[in-house]
Image (spheres, rainbow, N blue to C red):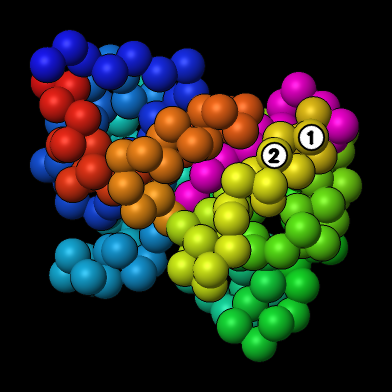
Amino acid sequence: MPTPQFRIKLYSDGADFKSMQAMNDNPLVSGMTTNPTLMKKSGITDYRGFAKQVLAAVTKKPVSLEVFSDDVDEMERQANEIATWGSNVYVKIPVTNSKGVSTLDLVKKLTTRGVHLNITAILTLKQIEEVCTALKGGAPSVVSVFAGRISDTGRDAVPFMKATVEHCRRAGSQCESLWASTREVYNIVQAQDAGCSIITVPFDILAKLKMW
């Protein structure tokens, strides 16, 4: 089969170091994301050590690393530390904590300071608009909408992603839209057709593309 070619940037999503090394060597993979939940499932207990191991291997592609506190003040402290681990680091901040407390003020504070951000776990049109407003004029950033989880509720995720693309455009050229929680290869086509800048893809779905 011919190798699929996409205009959209493909980011690998996972927490297996060997797989991340392989993705780093794959020219069709433009960046990487991981999170504490994936790390826990992989048996990783030393977050800082694992992150620095990854960043020692992946030096040119962007790597998104998430804060793991549920307290907004502690999120800020962790974000400031994680941002120092590498020039290619994007700090992942959930749009709310587990209690539903918004992180928008923190997002605004961090982006104004120059911290590269990946705002994650976005599920509503209101969150999309508010996050893009908070990021406007700030540092390079990514707006990660959980399109797969939206689809799991029986709704079409594509209009949400088209809205994200438009709000990111208004926020400025440094704000990129990202289709997250990918469920199948076809989501890559959908994300590209919606105009998204990036899609995160788990290792097993990337393998289905037969890119190597």
Q: Residue at x 44, y 31 (%)?
A: 189
Which region of the structure is painted magenta?
170-180
- Side of 126 relative to 193 (left or right): right
- Side of 98 relative to 203 (left or right): right
Q: Is residue 98 above or below residue 54?
A: below
Where does the image place residue 105, in percent across and percent down from the top left? 84, 63
Look at mark 2 in the image and give the residue it sits on.
Answer: 162
Secondary structure found at label 2:
helix
Q: Is residue 107 visible?
A: yes
Q: Is residue 81 magenta?
A: no
Characterize the local packing of mark 2: few (<14), some (14-19) or many (20 or more) Cα atoms within 10 angstroms: some
Q: Is residue 178 magenta?
A: yes
- Side of 99 relative to 138 (left or right): left
Q: Residue at x 18, y 22 (%)?
A: 211
Look at mark 1 in the image and give the residue it sits on.
Answer: 166
Which residue is at the far bottom?
A: 99
Q: Do the residues under discs 2 and 1 have CB atoms within 8 angstroms?
A: yes
Q: Residue at x 22, y 70 (%)?
A: 41
